[in-house]
Structures are given as structure tokens and as C-alpha cells.
Amino acid sequence: MATITGITGNQLLLGTKVCTNNKYQHVSSIDETDHSMNLGLIVQPKKVEDIKLALNYAKTKKIAVARKTG
């Protein structure tokens, strides 16, 4: 998956070391017997506009979105 143009926050690509280190936070609550979550990109937004861009990108590409707060 490519990165999303215009996002000012971090974009962590699947397969990179920094993504691997952060991935557990996003999928640790998923029960793999019932659900499967294969991440393509982790977006860490800095601004509300980053969230809008990410959601619009996902909608256009028909990609599912999972959110994590904290």
C-alpha cells in the first residue's frame, strides 16, 4: 500500500521495522479465531485534516478502516 498524499502525521508502511513495532498495539485486541486484520498502513494523524484525508482515501479505494484511540 502506498502512503497517502497530504498527511502531515506519521504513516507506517507494513513490513518496515517501525510498523512491526507499532502493529501489536493495533491488533492485540483482535481474536484471530473470529477476525482477521491484515494491516496495510498505520496512520498517526497530527491534525483533523489528516483524519479526513485518510478516511476519504479509504472510501475511494474501498479499504476497511480500524481506529485506535488512547
Image (cartoon, grey):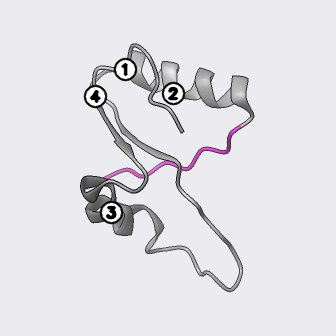
> In the rendered structure, which disc, 1 or 2, sits on the residue that comes first in sequence?
1
**Quadrant holding the N terminus:** top right
Label 3, label 4: how far apart the Cα atoms are: 18 Å
Question: Between marks 1 and 3, how big is the CA–CA gap?
Answer: 21 Å
> Label 2 belongs to which residue?
54
Residue beneath the point at 71% across and 23% down: 60
The secondary structure type at the circle numbered 1 is loop
- In the rendered structure, which amino acid carries the disc numbered 2? Ala
Q: Which residues are magenta?
A: 63-70
What mark, if any, has residue 20 been given in the picture?
3
Residue mark closest to the camera, 2 vs 3: 3
Q: Amino acid at mark 4?
A: Gly
Q: Residue at x 61, y 21 (%)?
A: 56
**Rendered image: mark on residue 7:** 1
Task: Evaluate if marks 1 and 3 touch, with contact meaning CB atoms under 8 Å apart.
Answer: no
Q: Residue at x 60, y 44 (%)?
A: 65
